[in-house]
């Protein structure tokens, strides 16, 4: 049976729109509020108690706000917890006092009559304390509350829905407008920060999808005909270009100015000399801008790069040889079919004549019934021109520039904590709370508080990507294997999300273990964990054959392109990376 994971209340229609883990929608209209919200006690949100079981809040016009629960039993259990929890005052109150608080006269209730009615049902005096009731009496007490609050049903209908995600082939397209036409009705929908549009109910008619090409013209980018709930990925229409960038002269030389610096994320096998050559700058300039003492760079590292560096600081032959010799992105081993690719953009030597070839790419559409989005998509490259809008493409925003930006976030967090125990990390960074403010884990520390999934979701959120939709699964490794925001791929790529096959642990893929090609080096939270050491963020090693690989849906086109090109992951070791990133010696690879 489908599990309800989210709910929105449409006050004007008196309808709750539930979303199931299957992608289907349940619409509940009319009936008692308690039935509509799966909230038999009409429990309200609390400012001092953490209620982790609700999936939405219903705002009413006159009666205030009420919690929405995924099912009737969960709502009943929350009512019982409210009445018996030591965090509340109810257990030590008399039945009369309970209803002065639970159903105050200020909310148009008659608490005295309410208390007497419930007491009669229980067969006791309203002056006794609630805590004096035995288990059977408490069940009758709750039944009487449910009857008083109202439990008559309305109408409900299950509806299939289309879900659309927008991507530029590597990252989400947030706050973008899409026009949909369905059954003669035209609507404008806007994507959220993670590139997700509001769900579109399916009523049998095809859904036509458009973008606003000009103020007066719409461009059709697809038609959705399925009668099943699916996730569709639309990749923005862009240009694919190959450019050899040389020096260009503008007629108005007053417009020439040095472009602002940007961040470049180091990719496996990059060297400083290669980066300097690619962006027409120098090794010396990059080292100065980033305060580098030597030529060592690490995949995932963020470097500040200044465009159009002046020629008075040339890259010496010695610098180039030194950078190539000493960088830490080691040469790869023998080719492997499931390895990381290089850039999809052809690069030419600096100073070559500019030759641009551009062709239009149709929007790529990938559809998936939940987590099987395996149809081909087109990854595209954005060609950015100068700030003045003149001259040839700068050829600065390349495939590698857009690859796996979340890895820089994960690495920075690992460097920040330097192998500190989870008991220290949790004082300021409880990842459970940062990705779900109603979660039930109050700390990272403890043998039952596994936080590997919370860490991965937090990294995704920091990169403005969708997290696991189901709040319960957001704290579990298994959540990534069944959520439509994440798609399984055939092999490892740099930055892919790795889930152990028994779904006990999740992390990010970094490279291949230089001691054994059968193992992968990964970066994750809640690693370590032997002895009295709780867990930290570090690099560890796991067997490749025991890992399933996933990427965010918005990154799927570029991930497929990377796999098709078959470039290798970096050969390295967990010990070496922990040392280079100043992560103190972890106590092994234990997880929980």
Image (cartoon, helix red, strand yellow):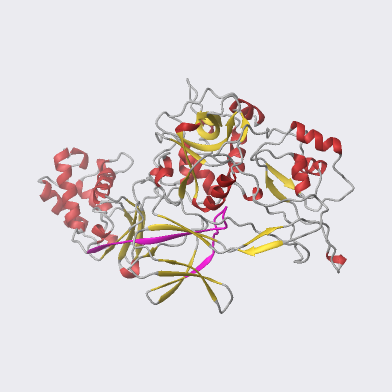
Q: Quadrant of residue 63?
A: bottom left
- Near-viewer residue (245 or 433): 245
Q: Could you tell me residue 483's position as x and y percent?
A: 41, 48
**Any magenta on residue 188?**
no
Q: Is residue 127 left or right of residue 20?
A: left
Seen as rendered, the residue at the extreme top is 531
Q: Quadrant of residue 88?
A: top left
- Near-viewer residue (476 or 567): 567
Q: Could you tell me residue 113's position as x and y percent?
A: 16, 57
Residue 423 visible in the picture: no
- Near-viewer residue (386 or 17): 386
Taking the spot 66% from the left edge, 30% from the top edge, the residue there is 580
Residue 42 visible in the picture: yes
Above or below 7: residue 451: above
Q: Main secondary structure of the magenta part?
A: strand
Above or below 64: residue 127: above
Q: Could you tell me residue 532's position as x and y percent?
A: 48, 21
Count of marks placed on residues = 0
Above or below 517: residue 4: below
Taking the spot 80% from the left edge, 48% from the top edge, the residue there is 281
Report the magenta residues as a range: 155-179
- Position of the C terminus, as image quadrant, is top left
Q: Could you tell me residue 379's position as x and y percent?
A: 58, 55
Seen as rendered, the residue at the extreme right is 312
**Any magenta on residue 171?**
yes
């Amino acid at each position: 049976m489908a599990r309800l994971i989210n709910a929105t209340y449409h006050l004007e229609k008196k309808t709750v729109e539930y979303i199931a883990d299957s992608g289907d929608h349940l619409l509940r209209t009319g009936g008692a509020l308690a039935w509509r919200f799966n909230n038999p006690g009409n429990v309200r949100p609390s400012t001092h108690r953490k209620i982790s079981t609700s999936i939405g809040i219903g705002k009413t016009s006159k009666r205030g706000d009420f919690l929405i629960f995924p099912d009737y039993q969960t709502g009943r259990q929350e009512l019982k917890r409210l009445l018996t929890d030591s965090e509340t005052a109810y257990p030590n109150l008399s039945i009369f006092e309970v209803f002065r608080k639970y159903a105050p006269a200020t909310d148009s209730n008659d608490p005295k009559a309410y208390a007497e009615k419930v007491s009669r049902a229980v067969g006791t005096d309203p002056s006794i304390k609630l805590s004096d009731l035995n288990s059977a009496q408490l069940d009758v007490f709750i039944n009487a509350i449910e009857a008083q609050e109202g439990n008559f049903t309305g109408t409900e209908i299950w509806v299939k829905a289309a879900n659309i995600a927008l991507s530029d082939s590597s990252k989400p397209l947030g706050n973008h407008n899409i026009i949909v036409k369905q059954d003669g009705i035209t609507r404008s929908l806007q994507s959220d920060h993670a590139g997700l549009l509001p769900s579109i109910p399916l009523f049998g008619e095809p859904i036509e999808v458009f973008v606003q090409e000009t103020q007066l013209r719409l461009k059709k980018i697809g038609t959705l005909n399925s009668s099943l709930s699916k996730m569709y990925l639309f990749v923005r229409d862009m240009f694919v270009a190959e450019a050899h960038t040389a020096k260009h002269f503008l007629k108005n030389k007053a417009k020439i100015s040095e472009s602002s610096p940007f961040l470049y994320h180091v990719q496996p096998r990059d060297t400083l000399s290669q980066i300097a050559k690619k962006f027409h700058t120098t090794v010396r300039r990059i080292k100065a801008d980033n305060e580098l003492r030597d030529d060592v760079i690490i995949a995932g590292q963020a470097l500040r790069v200044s465009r159009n560096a002046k020629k008075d600081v040339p890259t010496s032959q010695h610098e180039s040889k030194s950078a190539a010799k000493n960088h830490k992105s080691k040469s790869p081993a023998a080719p492997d079919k499931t390895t990381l690719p290089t850039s999809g953009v052809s690069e030419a030597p600096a100073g070559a004549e500019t030759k641009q070839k551009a062709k239009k790419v149709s929007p790529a559409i990938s559809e998936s019934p939940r987590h099987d989005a395996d149809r081909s998509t087109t990854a595209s490259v954005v060609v950015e021109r100068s700030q003045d809008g003149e001259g040839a493409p700068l050829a600065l925003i390349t495939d590698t520039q857009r690859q796996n930006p979340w890895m820089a976030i994960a690495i920075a967090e690992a460097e920040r904590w330097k192998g500190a125990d989870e008991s220290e990390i949790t004082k300021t960074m409880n990842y459970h709370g940062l990705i779900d403010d109603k979660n039930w884990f109050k700390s990272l520390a403890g043998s039952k508080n596994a936080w590997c999934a919370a860490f991965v979701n937090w990294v995704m959120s920091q990169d403005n990507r969708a997290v696991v939709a189901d709040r319960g699964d957001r704290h579990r490794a298994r959540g990534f294997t069944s959520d439509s925001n994440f798609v399984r791929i055939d092999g490892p790529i740099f930055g892919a999300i790795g889930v152990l096959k028994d779904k006990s642990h999740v992390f990010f893929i970094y490279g291949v273990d230089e001691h054994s090609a059968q193992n992968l080096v990964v970066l994750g939270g809640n690693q370590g964990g032997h002895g009295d050491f709780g867990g930290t963020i570090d690099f560890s090693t796991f067997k490749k054959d025991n890992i399933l690989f996933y990427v965010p849906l918005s990154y799927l086109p570029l991930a497929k392109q990377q796999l098709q090109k078959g470039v290798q992951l970096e050969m390295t070791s967990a010990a070496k990376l922990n040392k280079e990133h100043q992560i103190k010696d972890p106590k092994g690879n234990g997880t929980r």
